[in-house]
Image: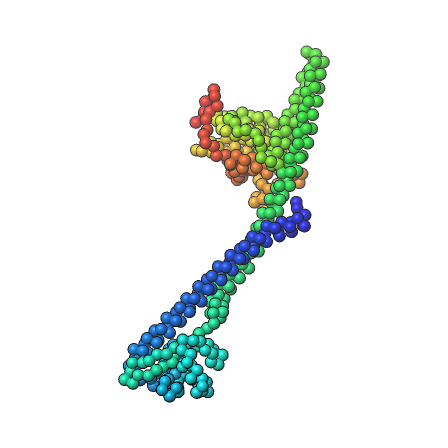
Amino acid sequence: MTSPAGGSSLFRRLVAPVVGLVLAAVLANVGFAAWLAARRASERAEAGRDKVAAALAASRVAMAQPVLDTLHELTGSHFVVWDATARAAGLTTLPPATLLPDVAASLADAVGDVTVLEGRRYRIGRVRSAGVRPETVLMLTPERSIASATLEAAWPLLAVAAATLALFVPVLLMALRSTLIAGERQRLLGQLAAGFAHELRNAVTGARLAIDLHRRRCDAGRSAMSPADDSLAVATRQLDIVEAEVRGLLALGRPTEAAVEPTDLDRLIDDVCSLTAARANHTGVTLDRGLPVGLTMPARRDSLRAALVNLVLNAIDAAGRGGAVRLDVIAEPGAVSLVVEDTGPGPPPALSATMHEPFVTGKPEGVGLGLAVAQAVAAEHGGTLSWSRHGDRTRFAIRLPVPTLKAPPGRAQRH
């Protein structure tokens, strides 16, 4: 497990940049959408202004005050009838106090520009009506600043983005942090497993050499009438189990360098049963296997055997005295499943989602590496490890995709 300082460092180096990129992408998207909305609003306002100007230019109605007031209510623009000769304003929709003579003159001179009246911005346009008595009309169209238009267009998007981020970012943080911690734990576990497996393999090799030497001495000194003693054979088998578990730890520690070779599945199951039979007999569990299938497949034999040994040992512990464990091979098009079933109650519901992770176990004396080893081996072969309940039995299956399934030389395939 990483220390709090290490976890904080990982958070700063990996999680924070990802969250920053997400925030930057969201803000960039909101900014572009707001700019686009403001631009479209400005274009609509300009198009509306042009339409009003065209309507006034084509109108043959005299510019009376009721007409100007109606136009103001419909468009929101202000109108001033302008006498260019006298340079004075006539009828208007602006408040009298606003339209002083000098103000009216400045409006007439500012056609095409933007002016400010009573704190509001107006764009000045000039239209000459086509009535019986042509009149010049100054049209003052309200115009918002780019900043206010952008803010008005952006705030709904910003509100939605803020609400989304408020919900999404904590979930993302938790997911990334969990992934980082799990990855770091897996890396440390690999280093620990590799070192531990190396030392354990040396110890197993030494113990096996000592047992072989002792067996030769005993065989040389035993008379023909002496009863057979299989204790050394049992000890050797126990060392075989330890060696299989060491291979599993090496599968966790680093990718195996073992070559893929044709593997006889029946012999593989026989080896697993032979390795675990002593444990099953000692605990009072019936160990059974399915009918031979006569199939071979490309695989790393030692890794698969280590994975199955771990599954069978877990199944024996789960079944308990008087229980039963069964190994079987189920072939299907393009895949094969190596199945271990037991009559135990199954994993605790609280661990069902995380029991494949290292150090997760429901047994008080368990370490929590058996299923992690099996899953690592399944993934190494491009397959999966799954579990399910079938009636009163718990089934763990390593499902492996294979290009071909064929009978080994000299053996017939069972259909």
Which of 411 and 26 lies nearest the eye of the viewer? 26
Q: Quadrant of residue 369?
A: top right
Question: Image point 55% across, 59% down: which residue?
Answer: 166
Residue 107, located in which quarter of the rendered image?
bottom left
**Farthest-out residue, top:** 224
Please provide percent x and percent y for residue 129. 31, 80
Q: Quadrant of the C terminus?
A: top left
* Residue that protrudes farthest toward the left in the picture: 132
Is residue 45 something that shows in the picture?
A: yes
Taking the spot 37% from the left edge, 70% from the top edge, the residue there is: 47
Residue occupying the point 62% across, 41% down: 187
Q: Is residue 7 above or below residue 236?
A: below
Q: Nearer the viewer, residue 193 or 148?
A: 148
Q: Say whether residue 301 is left or right of residue 217.
A: left
Q: Is residue 390 above or below residue 164?
A: above
Question: Would residue 315 appear left or right of 89 to someone viewing this image?
Answer: right
Q: Is the residue 40 above or below the residue 67 in the image?
A: above
What residue is at 49 percent from the left and 27 percent from the top? 296
Question: Where residue 247 sits in the image (x, y, percent)?
Answer: 61, 31
